[in-house]
Image: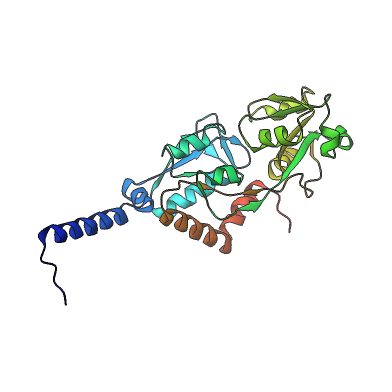
């Protein structure tokens, strides 16, 4: 066996080994467990996934899943308020360990962060007053100067409108009271994900999801993760897989949505 006698070379090799060991021990997954908290970025304005109540607490499908994820790690949840406009800057600035709350998978987001494995398929459809369903069946019908669109700022709904409905009138509104704009006839159409449209249809009589099985744009939902190491993504993916195969995820969905039998 060849022995290294040069003390400089030996010191360099030892430093490399120590640094490698330190890097390995400071993975994102390890840091979460060491800190005892899971920092969850969420907008709190997107039922049925995330909603901040008047008492300051959160509820929704992904809120329950965040608590489940934290429980699997033996840590507490720290909610980090964000908006659709600031979601990616907050993630890139290291303010959160995961972002949850009905987040759509896009290539633009994928360039800057990791996504977990897919939660569900959930495409864009129109949400309208029930009396107007026949008027807004297609992009051609909606993409007209006289049609009043309303969307939350900064998300994939607004991006869809800019890309496919440039002729229509667009107004930006907060995602909590936006549905009342439709009911009060202050807007005609909201393009949103089928899950949100079906939830609001159930919640607010007078609103109808148009062709919820025929997406105007295919979409998927997943959780957003920092792009720093693979250990954290692998853990989240495995936790999500087990949540699905054990029925835990479906149970949470059933508390919010009328699932097909």
Against 91, is 168 above or below?
A: above
102 and 93: which is toward the camera: 93
43 and 143: which is toward the camera: 143
Judged from this view, the residue extending furthest toward the front is 6
Q: Is residue 139 left or right of residue 163?
A: right
Against 74, is 186 above or below?
A: above
Residue positioned 88% across, 34% down in the render: 135
Against 181, is 195 above or below?
A: below
Q: Name the quarter where the N terminus is drawn.
A: bottom left
Judged from this view, the residue extending furthest toward the right is 134
Q: Residue 20 at x, y = what percent?
A: 27, 57
**Which of the 4 image quadrants contains residue 163?**
top right
Q: Residue 203 at x, y = what percent?
A: 71, 37
Q: Is residue 102 left or right of residue 169?
A: left
Q: Residue 156 at x, y = what percent?
A: 64, 38
Q: Which scheme is used to colour this image of the protein?
A: rainbow
Q: Name the quarter where the C terminus is drawn.
A: bottom right
Tally of numbered discs = 0
147 and 245: which is toward the camera: 147
Against 186, is 114 above or below?
A: below
210 and 204: which is toward the camera: 210
Residue positioned 57% across, 34% down in the render: 84
Residue positioned 85% across, 39% down in the render: 137
Q: Residue 232 at x, y = what percent?
A: 43, 54
Residue positioned 48% across, 55% down in the render: 236
**Which of the 4 image quadrants contains residue 194?**
top right
**Which of the 4 image quadrants contains residue 207?**
top right
């Amino acid at each position: 066996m060849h022995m290294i006698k040069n003390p400089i070379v030996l010191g360099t090799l030892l430093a490399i080994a120590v640094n490698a060991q330190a890097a390995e021990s400071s993975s994102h997954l390890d840091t979460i467990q060491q800190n005892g908290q899971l920092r969850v970025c969420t907008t709190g304005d997107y039922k049925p996934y995330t909603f901040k109540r008047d008492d300051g607490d959160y509820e929704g499908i992904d809120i329950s899943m965040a608590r489940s994820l934290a429980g699997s790690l033996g840590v507490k949840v720290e909610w980090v308020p964000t908006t659709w406009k600031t979601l990616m800057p907050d993630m890139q600035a290291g303010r959160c360990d995961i972002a949850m709350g009905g987040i759509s998978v896009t290539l633009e987001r994928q360039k800057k962060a990791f996504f977990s494995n897919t939660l569900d398929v959930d495409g864009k459809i129109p949400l309208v007053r029930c009396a107007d369903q026949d008027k807004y069946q297609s992009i051609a019908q909606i993409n007209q100067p006289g049609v009043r669109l309303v969307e939350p700022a900064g998300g994939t709904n607004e991006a869809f409108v800019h890309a496919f409905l440039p002729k229509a009138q667009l107004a930006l509104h907060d995602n909590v009271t936006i549905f009342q704009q439709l009911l009060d006839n202050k807007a005609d159409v909201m393009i949103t994900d089928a899950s949100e449209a079906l939830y609001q249809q159930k919640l607010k009589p007078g609103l109808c999801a148009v062709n919820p099985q025929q997406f105007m744009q295919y979409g998927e939902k997943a959780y957003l993760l920092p792009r720093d190491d693979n250990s954290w993504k692998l853990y989240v993916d495995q936790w999500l897989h087990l949540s699905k195969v054990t029925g835990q995820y479906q149970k949470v969905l059933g508390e919010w949505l009328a699932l097909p039998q």
